[in-house]
Image (cartoon, helix red, strand yellow):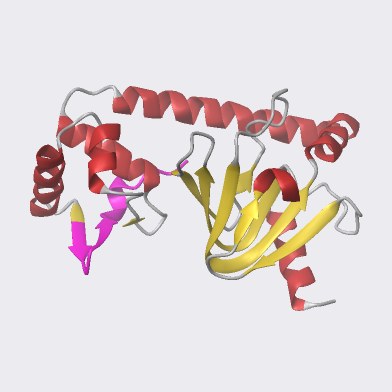
Amino acid sequence: MTKTQVLVREAMGKSPLFCRLNPESRELKTITATRNREIDALACCNVILVCSGEFEVFNSGNGGRVLISVLREGDCFGINSLYLRREDTGSVIRCRKGGVLLCMDAGAYRKHLASVPEAMEAYARFCNEKIHFLLGRIADLSVPNSKDRLLCYLRTVAAPDGTVVLPGSKEGLARKLNMSRAALFAQLARLQEDGVLSCEDGRYCLKKEFVTEE
């Protein structure tokens, strides 16, 4: 057994959404990606498990690219829209840190859920947790105070160690948070003064006690 095969099996065993799949199934496809490699999510498969590395997900359906999320070990892509009857609008996955992806066609994964009750229960539990998480984020982002709104956003995108990678430009982030560019810079500075956020060589890090755990 190769190192990649061992890595994939370990990742599957840890994932409640993949642990009941047969590692030998012909429906599973492994992709080893180096930094900056881009993968058409619709072309390769519809359900993806990150076995190692870091991957950025972009949506390019409106002529430009928007960073949707950053996937790390154990994260999945395509699960949230598994039963939606519509075409993908152009999701592109770009490797930020070399790693391995495990892919499966959405139709095959749906058959797996239909035939394994325990797998369907795990999927339902995952969806319920996601709904509650998103409802919490909506509540967070509805707060009128710009400082609190920024902090809520940083908590959402922060890695487990507190590292924060701001997507795109600060102007774009300011628009997303419904505040001026000047207000964004002022609130970033205030969070640093309060010891909530640190910045070194342009890299932000949120104090661990403020990091949101999904």
Q: Residue at x 60, y 34 (%)?
A: 89
Residue 71 in view of the camera: yes
Question: Is residue 75 depicted above or below 181 in this figure?
Answer: below
Q: Residue at x 79, y 69 (%)?
A: 5
The image position of residue 41, as x and y in percent, is 66, 47
| Residue 26 is one of the magenta-drawn residues | no
Direction from residue 41 to residue 168 in the image, left or right: left
Question: Is residue 200 depicted above or below 75 in this figure?
Answer: below
Question: Is residue 133 depicted above or below 77 in this figure?
Answer: above
Q: Residue at x 30, y 44 (%)?
A: 154
Residue 17 in view of the camera: no
Question: Is residue 70 depicted above or below 111 in this figure?
Answer: below
Looking at the rendering, which quadrant does residue 47 occupy?
top right
Direction from residue 100 to residue 119 in the image, left or right: right
Direction from residue 136 to residue 32 in the image, left or right: right
The image position of residue 72, as x and y in percent, is 54, 56
Q: Nearer the viewer, residue 28 or 151?
A: 28
The range drawn in magenta is: 198-214
Looking at the rendering, which quadrant does residue 145 occupy?
top left
Location of the N terminus (image quadrant): bottom right
Direction from residue 52 to residue 26 in the image, left or right: right
- Count of numbered tags: 0
| Residue 203 is one of the magenta-drawn residues | yes
